[in-house]
Amino acid sequence: MSLLNSLIHIVHRSSKRVGRGYGSGKGGHTSGRGQKGQLSREGGRRPLWFEGGQLPLTKRLPMLRGKGRFNVVNPTAEVTLGDIEKMKTKIINLKTLKEEKVIDHRFRKAKVINTGKLTRKVTIEIPVSVSGKQAIENAGGLIK
């Protein structure tokens, strides 16, 4: 092994301070920034989302902003018999559906439809389709 590899550095050169005159070691006139333009000016940096003057993405897609952003597309949630079978509670209403995260918390209405199988007794407190009503009553459930 060479002796040169084992020597420690005793000279620590600091980085050159750009734009501080000829004595700074990095030119005086343009200081490595080029001639003209936004990037040559002080404070001339662009934000990360800047697109060179093109219409920004937030303005090109106006429907993603604004007052209708948090509305649910379908105001009535469809709850299947299979969803009810997976739930732990025996009383099914809008509050319990939201608590067990069967439906999104933004829904204001829900309706039970006949898809899947129901094998246990439950009490339903939301609207039910005609065929769903028969399936719930066949399983021994109650509709209020």
Image (cartoon, rainbow, N blue to C red):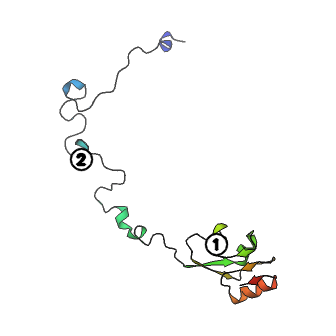
Which residue occupies 81% across, 85% down? 138
Q: Position of residue 63 (x, y in %)?
A: 41, 71
Placement of the C terminus among the 4 image quadrants: bottom right
Residue extending furthest left?
A: 29
Q: Quadrant of residue 105?
A: bottom right
Identified by mark 1, the residue type is Lys
Label 1: which secondary element? helix
Alpha carbons under labels 2 and 1: distance apart: 57 Å
Dot 1: few (<14), some (14–19), or many (≥20) neighbours within 10 Å?
Answer: few
Which residue occupies 77% across, 85% down? 135
Instruction: List the residue tagged with mark 2.
Output: 38
Q: Nearer the viewer, residue 85 or 19?
A: 85
Instruction: List the residue tagged with mark 1.
Output: 95
| Dot 2 or dot 1, earlier in sequence | 2
Which residue occupies 65% across, 67% down? 99
Disc 2 vs disc 1: which is toward the camera?
1
